[in-house]
Image (cartoon, rainbow, N blue to C red):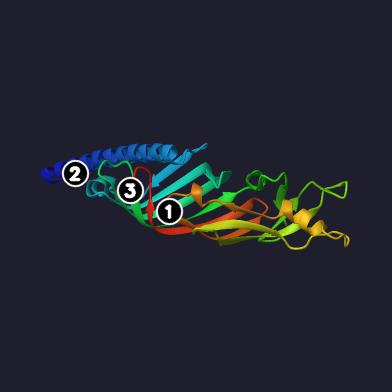
Amino acid sequence: MRFLRVVVIIGVVLGALFAGADRWAVDYAENRLAERIQAREGLAGDTEVDIHGFPFLTQALSHDLDRVDVKLKGVEAVSDGRKARLSQLDASFHGVKLNGDYSGGTAERAEGSALVTYQDLTAASEKGVTVTYGGAPGKVKVTAAVEFLGRKLAPSVVSTVTLVDAPGGGKMVRVRADEVPGGGLPGIEGVVRKKTDFDQRLDGSLPAGLRLTALTSDEAGVHLTLSGSNVVLAGS
C-alpha cells in the first residue's frame, strides 16, 4: 500500500512538472509567434496569440497545432498607393502546419472578423470627406466640402457600403450615395459624387490566404467577415 502511495505521489509530481513545463512552452511560443506576426504585418498596435490544445509539446514536436487564435490591433497596409487601416482583426487558424524553424506556418483554414472604424474609413477615402454611421446596417453618412458655381457647399449623403470584386482579383469596400440632394441643379450630382463615392481595398493588410467575404455596419464602424484556406502565418 505504501509503495502504491509513493507511486501515486511521484506521478502527481511528475504530472505537475510536465504541466508546468508545457504551460511555459506554450507561453513562450505564443510570445514568439506574436513577435513574428507583429514584424511581418508591420503593426502599429498590439498582437495577441492564443495556442489551443493540450499538451502543447506533443503538438510542437509533430509540427501540427490544432488551433491558433490571433488578435491584431492597428493593422495598416498600402494598396494602390493609398493607406488603409483595420482597427482590429480577430482570426482563428485551424490545422496549422508549422515550418521547420517554428517561425510560422500555414493553416488549412481560417475564419475571423475585422473592424474598420469610421475614423479609419474617413482617412482611407483621401477625399477630405467625413464618414459616420448611416443609421442602419450597411449604411454610412458621408459629408463632403464641395464648390459648385462659386458656392461652397457641405452636403451630407446616406450611402450604401458594400463588398465588390476588385480589379485583378480579391474584394474591395465600395461606398456609393443612395441619393444626392441638389435642388434640381444640373451637374451638381456629379460634383458631389466625385467626393462622396469611393472604393477602398483592404485585403493588402490581411494575412496571405485570408479573404473578405461579407460586411455590415453599425455605430462602431464597418465589420468585415473573413475566411480562407491555406492561410499563411508569420515566417512562411
Task: Let me know if residue 135 appears in the view.
Answer: no
Residue visible at 41% across and 39% down?
34
Per the image, label 1 sits on a secondary structure element best described as strand
Q: Which residue is mark 2?
A: 11
Residue visible at 82% across and 58% down?
187
Q: Position of residue 7 (x, y in %)?
A: 14, 44
Q: Which residue is mark 1?
A: 92
Q: Which of the 4 quarters of the picture holds residue 139?
A: bottom right
Task: Let me know if residue 15 appears in the view.
Answer: yes
In the picture, measured across the screen, residue 209 lies left or right of residue 103, that is: right
Q: State which mark lies toward you, 1 or 3.
A: 3
Q: Nearer the viewer, residue 166 or 3?
A: 166
Q: Position of residue 133 (x, y in %)?
A: 71, 53
Q: Could you tell me if the residues under marks 2 and 1 are in contact, i.e. CB atoms within 8 Å?
A: no
Instruction: Name which residue type carries label 2.
Output: Gly
In the picture, measured across the screen, residue 220 lies left or right of residue 172, that is: right
204 above or below 47?
below
For the image, the number of numbered tags is: 3
> What is the crowding at mark 1: few (fewer than 14 residues within 10 Å), some, or many (at least 20)?
some
